[in-house]
Image (cartoon, grey):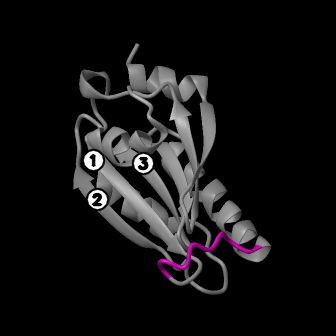
């Protein structure tokens, strides 16, 4: 079986808190951690960012912001994951924003699914960024390195 589909089927996650002198980052990441040749078919990293406070404020979300982001997360996980089109690998809450990191093979389809999701009265205040990353280096080198975790 494809290792990515095995990871999805296991649906396990871990949680970590990273503190610096002036901020805290909360990191939730999917297990097992894959990389290299283990990730066929999911070659694009898609990051969805929801700013909830001023950048570089070090702020964690308010209860109200957290509840709104939880609803959004449930919806985006369903939109992207019901058929394993995109797989979430990490959710970071840091410095006034939450970022969901997915891997997919079709960023345009993710955009269509995101646009088709139920919305609230106001559009979600999100920003998206996509980069080709067929070996999931971003996950290991930009996120998990802070936790001293190796794939």
Percent from the top left, x then y, of residue 28? 58, 45
Magenta stretch, residue numbers = 55-62
Q: Residue at horizontal 32%, vertical 29%?
A: 35
Read off the residue under disc 3: 102
Asked whether 36 or 145 is in front, the reply is 145
Q: Residue furthest top?
A: 1
Q: Earlier in the sequence, mark 2 or mark 1?
A: 1
Percent from the top left, x then y, of residue 76? 55, 57
Instruction: Locate residue 146: give its quadrant.
Output: top left
In the rendered image, residue 80 lying in the magenta stretch gets the answer no
Residue 44's tag is: 1
- Label 3, residues with CA under 10 Å away: few <14, some 14-19, many ≥20: many
Q: Is 17 left, or right, of 91 in this rendering?
A: right
Q: Residue at horizontal 61%, vertical 34%?
A: 13
User: Dot 1: what SS?
Assistant: strand
Residue 130's tag is: 2
**Is there any visible trace of residue 105 in the rendered image?**
no
């Amino acid at each position: 079986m494809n290792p990515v589909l095995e990871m999805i089927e296991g649906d396990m996650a871990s949680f970590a808190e990273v503190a610096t002198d002036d901020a805290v980052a909360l990191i939730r990441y999917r297990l097992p951690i894959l990389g290299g040749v283990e990730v066929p078919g999911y070659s694009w990293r898609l990051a969805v960012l929801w700013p909830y406070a001023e950048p570089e404020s070090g702020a964690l979300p308010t209860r109200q912001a957290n509840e709104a982001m939880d609803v959004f997360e449930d919806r985006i996980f369903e939109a992207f994951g019901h058929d394993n089109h995109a797989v979430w690998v990490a959710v970071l809450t840091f410095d006034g924003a939450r970022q969901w990191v997915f891997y997919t093979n079709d960023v345009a389809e993710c955009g269509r699914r995101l646009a088709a999701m139920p919305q609230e009265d106001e559009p979600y205040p999100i920003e998206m960024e996509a980069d080709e990353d067929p070996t999931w280096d971003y996950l290991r080198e930009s996120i998990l390195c802070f936790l001293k975790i190796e794939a």
